[in-house]
Image: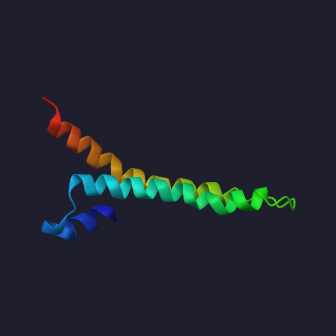
Amino acid sequence: MFAWIWIRLGRREPSVPAKFAIGLLFMALSFLVLVPAAAMAQSGEGVRVSPWWLVASYFVSEIGELCLSPVGLSSMTQLAP
């Protein structure tokens, strides 16, 4: 899906630093997904927190990794002697 989006962007494709920023933004969002789960766990009411919070956080971080990894590999290949 992401490859199709990048192809459709054509000349309007974001720069390498912008792609890094998008990937890091998704990684930050994956931590923010865990904030409500942590608040429920700290409430002291004996509420059990579902493991689906971790699955959702992992999913968001993987989207960020899919944005970040190919760009990082490509830019390091271009910068290598």
Q: Name the quadrant of the C terminus.
A: top left
Is residue 72 in sight in this rendering? yes
Q: Residue, x 58% and y 61% (percent of image)?
A: 33
Residue 27 or residue 3, whichever sits in front: 27
Q: Residue 50 location, x and y as percent?
A: 73, 59
Give the residue drawn at x 50%, y 59%.
Answer: 29
Can you say whether 49 is above or below 65 in the image?
A: below
Q: Position of residue 5 (x, y in %)?
A: 27, 68
Q: Quadrant of the N terminus?
A: bottom left
Left or right for 69, reference 59: left
Q: Residue at x 55, y 54 (%)?
A: 31
Q: Is residue 10 left or right of residue 64?
A: left
Residue farthest along the bottom direction in this orientation? 8
Asked if residue 21 lies left or right of residue 6, the reply is right
* Quadrant in the picture for residue 74: top left
Q: Position of residue 80 (x, y in %)?
A: 16, 32
Which of these two is toward me, 39 or 79? 39
Asked if residue 63 can be seen in this view, the reply is no
- In which image quadrant can residue 63 be found? bottom left
Residue 77 percent across, percent down from the top left: 19, 37
Query: In the displayed image of the protein, which residue is found farthest to the top?
Result: 81
Residue at x 29%, y 48% (from the top left corner): 70
Residue at far right of view: 46
Q: Is residue 4 left or right of residue 12?
A: right
What is the basis of the colouring in this image? rainbow
Q: Disc count in the image?
A: 0
Up-down relation of residue 12 to residue 79 (above or below): below
